[in-house]
Amino acid sequence: MVSKMTNLLSTLHLNLLTLLSNLFSHLTSLFFSLLSLTHALLIVLGLTRPNQWEPPTFLDSLLYSPLLHLTTNLYQTLLFLRGHPFHPPPHHSRIRVVCLSDTHSLRPPSIPTGDLLIHAGDLSATGTFDDLQDQISWLSSLPFRHKVVVGGNHDCFLDRASSIHRTRGQKEKRKLDWKGVVWLQDELTTLEFEDREMGGKRKLNIFGSGWVRRCGGDDFAFQYDDERPPWEGRIPVETDVLVTHCPPKGHRDLLLGCPSLLAELWKVKPKLHVFGHVHHGAGVESVFFDECQAAYEGLVLRTAAVEMSMLKRWFDFQGLKYALSVLRYGLQSVLWKWIMAGPGSNNGGVLVNAGVMKGNTGRLRKGRGTVKVVDL
């Protein structure tokens, strides 16, 4: 009798556990379904972004990190108040650099005049030989003393590791005619320009590379895994102009840029860094390579760390030290410039996300300022 009661209780216990397990599974499934439905509704209402390649909404920024959102706005305001990070050499002709990126087989209707044209990758939409050759021919026809390009992840034909070379047969073995356009992949070139003021020549050392953090399938070009970034020690210290497809972390990149590339930027400190890849990050930003910038980037890297949960990002007291350092060093720099009339170090540079696409619509942006121009 006791044995039968024990077996009955054991069976009831197992059935109860199974019932509770099934109930928990259904409730969990219902919770995530409601969560997905809520997310979809927020996207429709424009309160949150559909993916990481779109700019974050105000709600996105607050949910990710209120501290980083406020500090980023503070940092950008301080950069505006600090003005130009460097001045072109006096008594010499300026070298006008016109910057493009991510044309994706399209042609901006108006290209400003200049001395040097730079295209920072994703010339093509399909990555085929014909698509790339058409863009090269167009670039070659533009009236610039020099034209420099790097590849992008969509320029598949340029990367022999892309699966496009294993799937499209003999046709893809043709050679591109660069027609005077300089393509750089992990290379440094020195270009000369006429100095119309003093006579003689001015020179620029330009290093270019198309490497980009992995973001697609095997057909994409120049991709690398985050565990094995290619940048350490690769960029020569004598580089004046750096051209990459990938952005540095924390600068006009929707936080999709590369921390390793950012570290190399500090070692080299080029006067100009032109990149693209993140369409919604298009624009120009000053860098001063000082304590204010280091504090801001420290907060960006800390907040983006994998181990930082949402609660840790919301209540990040260690990160608050970085934010206060941005405020302290930034105000010192602004006061020195505007009150003490300090000349500045003239050791800064300019970062240009040269993308010309209207976000991820597949269409070009219109209007003045679409194509970026920098004087060196």
Image (spheres, helix red, strand yellow):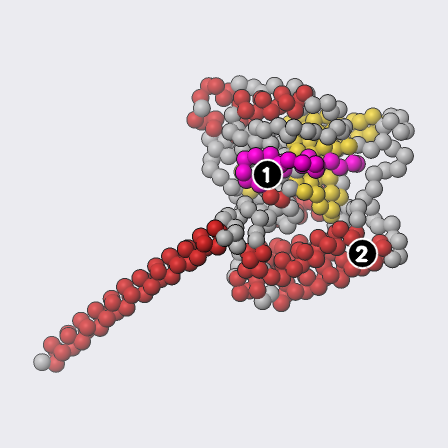
Query: What is the spatial separation of the Cα atoms under label 1 and label 2, in whole angstroms?
Result: 35 Å
Quarter of the view holding residue 133? top right
Specify the label residue 227 is tagged with: none
Towards the viewer: 279 or 242: 279
Question: How many numbered discs sit on the rendered protein?
Answer: 2
Q: Which residues are magenta?
A: 355-376
Left or right of 17 on screen, residue 314: right
User: Is residue 200 among the parts visible in the rendering?
Assistant: yes
Judge whether 351 appears above or below 292 on screen.
Answer: above
Quarter of the view holding residue 360? top right
- Residue 26 at x, y percent in the picture: 31, 62
Specify the label residue 333 is tagged with: 2
- Residue 41 at x, y percent in the picture: 45, 54
Q: Is residue 369 magenta?
A: yes
Towards the viewer: 188 or 91: 91
The amino acid pointed to by label 1 is: Lys
Quarter of the image with the N terminus in it? bottom left
